């Protein structure tokens, strides 16, 4: 848009590349790599439910950011190309974060089945009645068998309420056993102990089909950084084919999907996303070639491999990696049209070891830092017993008196500094209240703020790191810190 | 870009990061950004000015205003919707549905940014709210980005089951030079403030408006205040108060504006004494105008309390504050007795208040006194509760004269409770009432001084 208005062709191209790559990193939720076995399994389940009318239930488990949702999306995408998914089946997607309440879930199910009109103002006695009614609506609608239904429950653990009864799960799993309707229930969660959360009656109706997805499972002989490198190349490469052809393809695709197979372009975005952004046709093919060469060259760089290895030590979460790539791509501009390996390593360092807490400690004033040190010493002496303001003040004044060079500040100011520490949650009250924001103490056991007990909420290593690298720290404080007990 | 950097000084790196991440036009936004940094480091200011500059559709939600999620959801929707329709939105599902509706109706691919200021408050809400907002992009079809602004670090946000990780940015504090630069930018408003409050001749006014004078003042000011305080807002406030005092001798023609050493000698004791008022916002002057240089921080400014002059002076020190109560004679003794009862262990009462307590245990006491640990002193652990009997016993012990136990005397206790000097029930129940003295040592010694009583002599900790 604004990029096209400017005259500089380099700028236009860079902006387009940036936009394309950002879109590829963030919005592409269909392309899926690896885990072919699990993917086939899910595909098989869905396919059998949709085309053969079988009922299934399954649970997919895997840590955060390993691609569980993307797997499902890609399977659905594939199936939608093979069969008429919108007519043959109803996909109901529920997310535990939003629909954990039964009433809300039911409302959402009704909406996703497009049965709001049928339900109208009807009042139902129980959840089961309501669900049964919804299913019967589907059956009686036309003179044919009921549509297949795919229930995808993300954040499955959120549906397993411990206090209340798990009505939704019970009913869903129950239907998979009855002849009412062909239905596939797929739970997705990152909690490995999710089975223990289920009620007995729910558990007995579940098929116990578990699918585990682990980030580094399938290629154990290769170090994970090489997998990341492949991802990097794949995500940052632009579609190779000539742009004229691509443009034509994307148009044709929107009209009729079956005539043109989707494998013409490698590394391209899925067409339904591209259709929303028409201005990619201005991408210059020479530029794309140049860019892809640059990316491939970068992937060979040993510095890049080193950074990725470092990242793998800390996390194998692909979402975090995508965030890193996003930051990397967003740095592209006219002045720096290429990705720099040092940028990548800087961003990775920032992400895996942000040390924000150390920086927060370093942002304290000298007075506040002194209080933290005083408190640390006090807790060392008394074996980690919590301290109140008076004790900290006592230690601090002892130090301040022994050093004539320190300016003395009056008590109210020190108290304010202490409260500031509390607000930053560097120190935490020991009482049942874990934060100052939800203080619900009764008046009977209220203590004056000077006598409220606190513990230090930052680890000692962070304090010593902060003191070590503190800018313009007076020497006496450094000395006091290192010589601990006075 | 330059314009915005002038408006938000000393934050180039952070502004650049934000501009890069948010892109331009209909570029894809990141899922969520988490911004942390101590108070008054320009977090909200940066985000707001970047968003305004990019002209994105955005809502800024101050989480402190949202005591129920419903208010927050409706705030988001009404901020994004151009039409003025009352939307009811109680649950996250309603929110996502409404957002999807908006996407179809109006927004399309255009970027939408939702800013949560003071995001630490989100932790007290239902735990799935923040998790859901962190992945809002996945939950609805919008090109949406959520930005969380908070003074806490990300580790303080504890998610039991993990969340989609945001991109984290950190805003470091301004260092001394940057603080100097920022406060110096507001020189004009400082001068204006000065000119409003004082009548100034034209030639002196020229002197005052010289930037060197203000720079010299700021150097002196920061050398004293930088150590206990790094909060820009507070420093600006204190600088404003003190700059007037700095200029007073110049206005009165006592000190020449170029005589820096004399000016320094004049201001340094004033700065030292006003250090005591740091954060307390008790200004001695009657100035009620909002302090200058705070235009850009109006969201965070704390209203300056406008006490009556006399009250202000009384509040500045505990001593005058204690005297301001003007308690009756016996009430003072009752208060002292309450303090002694709170801070002395009951088993030592006999030794402290009786004339013939025997001397046989003296050696043991000395041994004990040596073993006393400062951290375990009663004065450091806080007041203990005591019964009415004990209070009255101590009261009669420390009072020289003999007076009867009248209802008047008991009413005094109720008064002290009412004045919040003693904590306890207002009704006096002779058998069950439990009290606690809640004033500090400074206060008590000020009260004791007026009746010629030595508190230290009767405190177990000081024996």
Image (tube, helix red, strand yellow):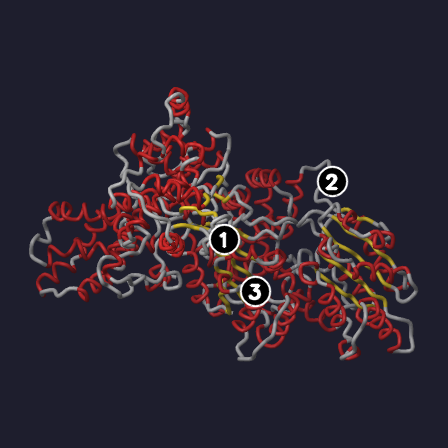
Image coordinates of residue A168 in percent, x first then y, are 79, 61
Q: Under tag 3, what secondary structure?
A: loop
Cα–Cα span, label 3 and label 2: 48 Å
Q: Is residue A301 above or below residue B231?
A: above
Image coordinates of residue B422 in percent, x first then y, are 40, 50
Task: Depth check: give the residue in front, B320 or B331.
Answer: B331
Q: Under tag 2, what secondary structure?
A: loop
Q: Is residue A434 left or right of residue A180?
A: left
Indicate the chain on which mark 2 is placed: A
Task: Tell me the residue that label 3 is attached to.
Answer: B68
Image mark for residue A219: 2
Task: Depth check: give the residue in front, A164 or B405.
Answer: B405
Task: Tell me the residue that label 1 is attached to.
Answer: A443
Image coordinates of residue A218 in percent, x first then y, are 75, 42
Label 3 with label 2: CB-CB less than 8 Å: no
Please tell me in which quadrant of the rendered image residue B103 appears.
bottom right
Indicate the chain on which mark 1 is placed: A
């Amino acid at each position: 848009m604004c990029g096209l208005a400017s005259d500089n062709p380099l700028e236009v191209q860079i902006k387009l590349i940036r936009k394309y790559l950002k879109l590829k990193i963030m919005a592409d939720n269909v392309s899926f790599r690896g885990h072919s076995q699990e993917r086939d399994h899910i595909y098989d389940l869905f396919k059998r439910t949709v085309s053969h009318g079988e009922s299934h239930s399954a649970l997919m488990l895997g840590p955060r950011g390993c691609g569980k949702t993307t797997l499902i999306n890609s399977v659905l995408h594939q199936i939608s190309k093979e069969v008429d998914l919108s007519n043959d089946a109803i996909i109901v997607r529920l997310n535990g974060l939003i629909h954990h309440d039964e009433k809300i879930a039911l409302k959402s199910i009704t909406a996703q089945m497009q049965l709001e009109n049928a339900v109208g103002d009807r009042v139902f006695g129980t959840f089961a009645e309501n669900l049964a009614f919804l299913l019967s609506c589907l059956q009686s609608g036309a003179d044919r068998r009921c549509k297949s239904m795919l229930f995808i429950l993300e954040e499955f653990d959120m549906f397993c309420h411990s206090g209340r009864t798990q009505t939704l799960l019970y009913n869903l799993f129950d239907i998979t056993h009855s002849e009412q309707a062909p239905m596939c229930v797929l739970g997705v969660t990152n909690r490995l102990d999710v089975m223990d959360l289920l009620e007995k009656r729910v558990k007995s109706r579940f098929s116990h089909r578990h699918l585990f997805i682990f980030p580094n499972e399938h290629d154990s002989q290769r170090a994970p950084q090489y997998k990341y490198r492949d991802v990097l190349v794949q995500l940052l490469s632009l579609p190779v084919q000539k742009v004229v052809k691509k443009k034509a393809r994307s148009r044709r695709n929107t009209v009729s999907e079956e005539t043109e197979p989707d494998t013409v372009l490698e590394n391209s975005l899925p067409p339904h996303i591209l259709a929303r952004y028409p201005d990619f046709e201005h991408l210059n093919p020479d530029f794309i070639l140049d860019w892809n060469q640059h990316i491939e060259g970068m992937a060979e760089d040993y510095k890049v491999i080193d950074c990725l290895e470092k990242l793998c030590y800390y996390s194998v979460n692909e979402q975090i990696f995508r965030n890193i790539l996003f930051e990397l791509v967003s740095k592209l501009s006219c002045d720096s049209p290429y990705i720099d390996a040092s940028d990548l390593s800087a961003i990775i360092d920032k992400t895996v070891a942000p040390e924000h807490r150390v920086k927060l400690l370093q942002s304290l004033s000298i007075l506040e830092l002194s209080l933290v040190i005083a408190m640390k010493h006090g807790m060392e002496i008394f074996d980690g017993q919590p301290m109140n303001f008076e004790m900290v003040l006592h230690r601090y004044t002892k130090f301040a008196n022994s050093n004539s060079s320190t300016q003395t500040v009056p008590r109210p100011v020190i108290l304010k500094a202490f409260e500031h520490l509390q607000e930053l949650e560097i120190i935490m009250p020991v009482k049942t209240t874990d934060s100052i924001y939800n203080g619900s103490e009764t008046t009977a056991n209220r203590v004056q703020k000077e006598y409220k007990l606190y513990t230090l909420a930052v680890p000692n290593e962070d304090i010593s790191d902060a003191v070590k690298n503190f800018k313009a720290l007076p020497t006496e404080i450094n000395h006091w810190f290192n010589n601990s007990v006075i | 870009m330059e314009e915005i950097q002038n408006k938000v000084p000393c934050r180039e790196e952070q502004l650049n990061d934000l501009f890069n991440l948010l892109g331009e036009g209909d570029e894809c936004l990141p899922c969520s950004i988490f911004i942390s940094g101590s108070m008054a480091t320009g977090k909200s200011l940066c985000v707001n000015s970047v968003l305004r500059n990019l002209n994105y559709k955005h809502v800024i939600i101050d989480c402190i205003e949202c005591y129920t999620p419903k208010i927050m959801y409706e705030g988001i929707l009404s901020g994004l919707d151009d039409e003025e329709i009352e939307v009811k939105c109680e649950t996250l599902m309603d929110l996502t549905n409404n957002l999807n509706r908006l996407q179809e109706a109006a927004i399309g691919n255009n970027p939408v940014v939702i800013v949560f200021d003071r995001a630490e408050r989100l932790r007290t809400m239902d735990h799935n709210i923040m998790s859901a907002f962190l992945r809002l992009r996945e939950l609805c079809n919008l090109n949406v980005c959520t930005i969380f602004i908070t003074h806490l670090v990300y580790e303080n946000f504890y998610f039991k089951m993990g969340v989609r990780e945001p991109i984290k940015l950190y805003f470091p504090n301004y260092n001394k030079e940057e603080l100097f630069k920022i406060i110096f930018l507001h020189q004009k408003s400082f001068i204006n403030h000065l000119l409003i409050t004082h009548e100034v001749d034209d030639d002196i006014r020229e002197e005052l408006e010289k930037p060197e004078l203000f720079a010299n003042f700021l150097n002196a000011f920061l050398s004293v205040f930088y150590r206990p305080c790094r909060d820009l807002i507070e420093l600006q406030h204190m600088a404003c108060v003190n700059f007037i005092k700095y200029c007073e001798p110049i206005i009165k023609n006592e000190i020449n504006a170029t005589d820096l050493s004399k000016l320094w000698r004049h201001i340094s004791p004033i700065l030292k004494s006003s250090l005591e008022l740091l954060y307390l916002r008790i200004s001695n002057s009657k100035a009620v105008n909002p302090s200058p240089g705070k235009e850009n921080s109006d969201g965070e400014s704390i209203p300056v309390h406008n006490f009556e002059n006399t009250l202000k002076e009384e509040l500045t020190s505990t001593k005058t504050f204690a005297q301001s109560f003007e308690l009756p004679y016996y009430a003072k003794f009752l208060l002292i007795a309450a303090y002694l009862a709170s801070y002395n262990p009951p088993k030592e009462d006999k030794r402290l208040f009786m004339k013939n307590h025997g001397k046989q245990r003296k050696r043991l006491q000395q041994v004990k006194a040596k073993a006393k640990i400062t951290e375990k002193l009663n004065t450091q652990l806080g007041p203990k509760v005591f019964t009415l009997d004990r209070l009255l016993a101590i009261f009669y012990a420390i009072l020289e004269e003999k007076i009867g136990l009248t209802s008047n005397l008991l009413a005094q206790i109720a008064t002290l409770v009412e004045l919040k000097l003693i904590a306890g029930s207002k009704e006096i129940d002779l058998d069950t009432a439990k009290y606690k003295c809640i004033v500090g040592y400074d206060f008590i010694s000020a009260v004791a001084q007026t009746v010629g009583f030595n508190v230290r002599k009767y405190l177990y900790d000081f024996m």
